[in-house]
Amino acid sequence: MAAPAESTDASFSATSSQSATVSAAENVPLQYSLILDHLIGDKRPVKDLNPTVMGALPSPQKTEEQKMIERGMESCAFKSLIACVGGFVLGGAFGVFTAGIDSNVGLDPKDPLRTPTAREVLRDMGQRGMSYAKNFAIVGAMFSCTECLIESHRGKSDWKNAVYSGCITGGAIGFRAGLKAGVLGCGGFAAFSAAIEYYLR
C-alpha cells in the first residue's frame, strides 16, 4: 500500500513543477526590442562586403593617373565646360528649329514682298542658331559653375544648390537690363530650377 502513495506523490510533484515552470515562463515578458536590435538595430552584425569574400573578382587598385582623371572630371571647371558645350549644341539646335518654323526668315525688311532665296534663308537660320547657341552656352556654363561652387562651399548635394545657382545666374543675366529685370530673372530662374529639381528627384 505504500508504493501507490509514493507514485502519487511523485506524479503530483512533477505536475506541480511543470505548472510552476509554465507560470514562470508566462510571467517573463518577451523582449522583442532585443531581438529587433540584433536583427535590424545597432547590435546587428555588419557583414563584410568585400568582393573577395563574396566570391567575386577583386577590384584592381586605382593608379595615380586614374585618380587624377577622376579629380579632373569632378572639378568645377570640367563641369562648366561640359555644360557650356552641351548648351551650345542644344541652343544651336533650338535656334535652327525655331528659324525653320518662322515664316519671316530670310525676308528683306526693305522689300518684304520679295521671295527670299535658299541661301538667304540658310544664312538667317545659321545666324539665329549661332545666337541661341552662344546664349545657351553662357547660361549653362554660369549655372553649372555656380552650382558646383555652392555645393563645394555648403558640403551638401540637395535641391537648394540648384535654386541658389538659378537665382545667381538669372540675376546676373537680368541685371544688364536693370534692377527690376535682375530681380525677376533671379526669381524666375530659381523657380524653374526648383521645379526641375523636384521633377528629377
Image (cartoon, rainbow, N blue to C red):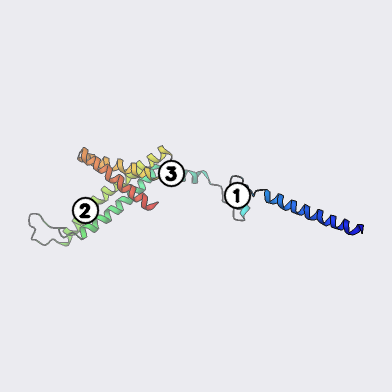
Residue 151, percent across and down?
40, 41
Name the residue located 88 percent from the left edge and 57 percent from the top edge: 5
**Mark 1 vs mark 3: which is more N-terminal?**
1
Which numbered disc, 1 or 2, marks the residue closer to the eye? 1
The outermost residue toward the front is 1
Write down the residue under mark 2: 128
Q: Which residue in the protein does label 1 denote?
A: 36
- The answer to whether residue 173 is visible is yes
Is 84 on the left-hand or right-hand side of 32?
A: left
- SS class of the residue under badge 3? helix
Can the viewer see residue 138? Answer: no
Residue 72: image tag: 3
Residue 64 in the image: x percent, y percent? 51, 43
Amino acid under label 1? Answer: Leu
Identify the disc placed on residue 141: none
Type of the residue with mark 3: Gly
Q: Label 1: few (<14), some or many (≥20) within 10 Å? A: few
The mark that comes first in sequence, 3 or 2, is: 3
- The kind of residue on which mark 2 rests is Arg
